Amino acid sequence: MTVVVLVADAPVEGVACEELVAETPLSESDGVALYRAVLKDVFATLADSTIDPLVNYPGPDDLPADAAPAEDPEAILRGLAASVVEPDRLSDFRFEVQIGSNFSAKAGNAITHLLEDEERTSASALRPCVPRLVRSVVDEAAIKLRRNDVVLGPAGDGEVYFAGFQDTIDFTDVFEEKALESVAGRAGDQGLTVDFARPREVLDSARSLRTVVTRLRAEMLAGNPVPEHTWAFIEDRGLRVEDGTLVMDDTTVSTDAE
């Protein structure tokens, strides 16, 4: 069974959904609420999937200088997981502190440790804010990873939401720009085989939020399942797309800043 490492951001104001807060009228408290809602749905998906979950939580250096003592990322993340995962499955979730200065270093250190020190056959990194992650996507990616050295889940703008490995690569800044191309290129340089999972959005811009809102509203109209907690946030804030623009109750959310 592959280990899926959720490389989490600090679920606190000033960090959670920072790009969305900067690009839209969503407040910092809205950003935290959205991030925690998505995390609940991701935790529920990982619990249902045939993988070993590992939550890589931020250390003290990843918190804002004015963070309250009660804003302990590990405790918050454990609480969010416990709210949606049955106790017997929750016992399978590992929680370990992150090591590294950026996503590439944090993901790379975790994957290298699992493959080399723990001698796991495969390990994967997952970005935290993937609202349309479902069990079939995770399980299909895990199955592909049995037959390929590297499996990548494409996200918007050439990024990745999932990156699975049977062997390590040079992880230095590999996820920081055009991650899909960068990881595939470095894997190819080492003679590793690469395959791809189904695309999914990462909530990291006003554009991605607009895409997710539109897709989830379409899924509801079609009578299809939607992520419970993310959908509850969208409904509570009245988020919708009108005339190509993302709006919410009494507020217009511009997407021109991208």
Image (cartoon, rainbow, N blue to C red):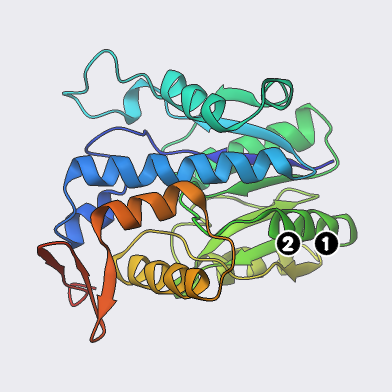
Residue 117 drawn at (x, y percent): 77, 27
Q: Nearer the viewer, mark 2 or mark 1?
A: 1
Residue 73 drawn at (x, y percent): 40, 24
Residue 135 drawn above or below residue 53:
below
Q: Assign the N terminus to one quadrant of the image.
A: top right
Q: Secondary structure at mark 1?
A: helix
Residue of label 1:
144
Query: Of callouts 2 and 1, which one flags the residue occurring earlier in the amino acid sequence?
Result: 1
Furthest residue in direction top, as rendered: 69
Question: In this rendering, would 120 be left or right of 200?
Answer: right
Front one among 1 and 165: 1
Which residue shows up at 19% across the image and 54% down it?
26
State yes or no: discs 2 and 1 in contact (Cβ < 8 Å).
Answer: yes
Which residue shows up at 74% across the image and 51% down it?
165
Work out whether residue 16 can be spotted: no
Residue of label 2:
151
**Label 1 amino acid?**
Lys
Question: In this rendering, would 178 be left or right of 253?
Answer: right
Residue 106 drawn above or below residue 132:
above
